[in-house]
Structure formats: structure tokens, C-alpha cells
Image (cartoon, rainbow, N blue to C red):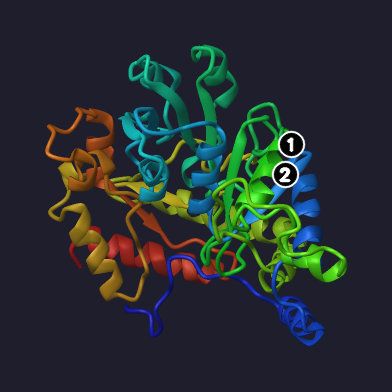
Amino acid sequence: MTRPEYLPFGKPHFSDREIAAVTRVLRSGWVGMGPETIAFERELADYVGAPHVVTVNSCTSALFLSLLVSGVGPGDEVICPSLTWCSTANAALYLGAQPVFCDVDPDTLCLTVEHVLAKVTPKTKAVMVVHLGGLAADVATLRAALPKGVVVVEDAAHALGARFPDGKPVGSSGNLTCFSFYANKNLSTGEGGAIALFDGSLAEQLQSLRQHGLPVDAWKRFSHPQQLLLSNPLDRLGYKMNYTDLEACIGRIQLTRQPEFAAIRLDIAQRYVNGLKAMSPPLGFQRHCLDPYHARHLFVVQLALDRMRLNRDEVVLALRAQNIGASIHYAPLHLMPLYCDGRQPASLPVTEQVAARMLTLPISASMSLSDADDVLRALEAVIEGR
């Protein structure tokens, strides 16, 4: 039976508290980067276990700035998994560097030390670690195994609230760690991103770079009228990548609601796991997806294609026809023309195998267990050809 209304893949959960916060900021007359942004950065730093957080307008900008301040430039190579969103690789291209794609573990869907080391060359400047779906990859072992001078940048767009096996939060590793606040993320402010880091001087550099390279931002000029716009001449090329108080006030409320959201996501994931195990054929899912340290931003399913009449894309389209917002995360980047640039694509057998049979089911703090049951009923009907 088709749902009467479409179930989005990921819908943010906003309450009257977020609406009241937006109203308060609108009435204040200051909606750009200012006191709310500063407070959100401080609160977020405490949450992720880092002394500094610098907010920006997107996680893509966070990845780009992280590579920039790490010294990545033309001629450098940046290793990243192919199973990720294009922003991970594009951050390297923006700087004239070359993304080099590595394979992933078939069960965790994250890169491994072995796969990364197989791609290291004298040109390797950085490794982009993607915590896919909200499962924290082992960055400590990776960093210890890498040659001296190779930087680790964590793409934690899925991983706010995730923890490493030792219980420490993603963001506390000491690596530049990039978060996303896009519409469907566990903490949503519509758009936005952040960089968690331990180096205070680097944080000041990022604060300048996000605002044209200016020595003082708009809030400092407003709150300290004696500051002139260019009292100190520009000495670096900056960008327009700042966050705003209108977004930050939402983020501050969303941050306090993370335990509530995490509990809902866990209940939905448990419902999915029970249902997938009972299907014929039973379907696979990401290892550790019920682990308390998993952020559960995505719920990834592995189809048993050898026992099905449909391929993955047909399953996704059939689910959408039943108003179930299934999606695909992700199509392998190493096979796309932009990254091949006329060259023969690298051979990444695990990525290619899992990508052909993986899809993501809807999961969000706005869902109910009844919604999850609708997803399972529709998925079972599609697989069985009903």
C-alpha cells in the first residue's frame, strides 16, 4: 500500500524553540556573523572536544579551507575514498591539487590504513578521511602509519555526535575536522559548516580567510566602532565563507537537542535492522550501525542483487513511486569523467562492488516508527515483486 504522503530521505526537526530563536535574532536587527555565531562556536567546541571551532558557510568551504591552511597546492596529491560526496575531492581540485582515490572496507564503507598506504607517493600532501554515514574511521592508526608531513583532514559531514572506539567524540582527534549543518544533517541550520581544531593561531587564520582575509570582521567593527575597515592593509587573499547569526541561533538549539535526535535515530535503525534480517533474501547493512558511537546520519542497505530480479536503481525508483524517499550514497567518484580527465580510472574493486548494490533508507529525527514500518513494507514488496 502506497503512503499518502512522500517520506523525505532526511527531514530536519525544528521545534518552537528554533522558531523563537530566529524571531529573537530577527528582532535584534543583527542577522550576520556576530554574538550568536561566537556562542555557537564555543558551545560546539565543548561538544566535540576541541579547543577551537570556526564556522563557515558550508562543509565544502570547511574542507577547502582546511586543505588551504595545510599548505595543499598545485602538484600535490590528496588521497580520499571514491565512495563519498564530490565535495571531498573537489576541495583538492579547487587548490590545483590532484585527488587520488582509494578503496574502502566492504562492511564499514570507510577507508582503511592499508588502502590509503597503497596510494601514498612522494607527492601525497594530505588524506581526507570520510566518516561515512556517521561511523568514525580509525584516524589514530592512520595518522601513526602515514609518512611525516602528510596531513589528515576529517570529512565529518555525517559524523556530528559520532565517537571513536575510545569514546572520544569526532572532532577531538587534533586533526582539522569538518562538519556540515546542511538541511538533512543530524544538526541542521539549513546550510553551514564548521572546522574543529586545536591550533589557536590556525583558528585565527581561518577566521580571517572566511571573511575576505580581513583582520577584523563585521561584528568586531560594529561592537568596536573605533575599528576601521582597513586599518590594517590586506596581506592575504580571503574568501566570502562566513556563517551567520540567523543560522547560529538555530544551531545552538539543535545542539541541545542532539540526545533527543540520537535516540530517535537509534530506534529507527533498530527497526530497520530487525526488518532487514527477516526479509527473503535478508539484506545487509553497514557494520556497527547500532553501535552507540555511530551517529546514524545515513542508514545504508546492501541489496542481495544475485537473488533479485531488479537492480539497485530500479529498487530506488520503485520505492520512490511508493512515496518512500530512498536515495543513493554514493556513486563512485573515480569513475566520473571530471576526475578521470581522459585517463583510465583506477581499479577500486570493493567500491565498485558495494556501490552497485547499496542504497540509503530514510532516517531522520522527524520520522516515527510507523514511518520506518512503511519503509520496510515497501522495500519488501519491491524485492518480492508485489
326 relative to 348 in the view: left or right: right
Q: Which residue is mark 1?
A: 201
Q: Which residue is nearer to you in this view: 56 or 234?
A: 234
Q: Please report the residue visible at 37 percent of the width from the left and 68 percent of the height from the top.
A: 325
Q: Please report the residue visible at 34 percent of the width from the left and 60 percent of the height from the top.
A: 327
Q: Position of residue 65 (x, y in %)?
A: 54, 45
Q: Quadrant of residue 219?
A: bottom right
Q: Which residue is nearer to you in this view: 64 or 224?
A: 224
* Mark 2 crowd level (few <14, some 14–19, many ≥20, 10 Å Cα): few
Q: Label 1, label 2: how many angstroms apart (C-alpha)?
A: 5 Å
281 relative to 144 in the view: left or right: left
Q: Quadrant of residue 171?
A: top right
For the residues bearing labels 1 and 2, Cβ distance under 8 angstroms? yes
What is the quadrant of the C terminus in the image?
Answer: bottom left
Q: Which residue is mark 2?
A: 204
What is the quadrant of the N terminus in the image?
Answer: bottom left
Specify the amino acid type for callout 1.
Ser
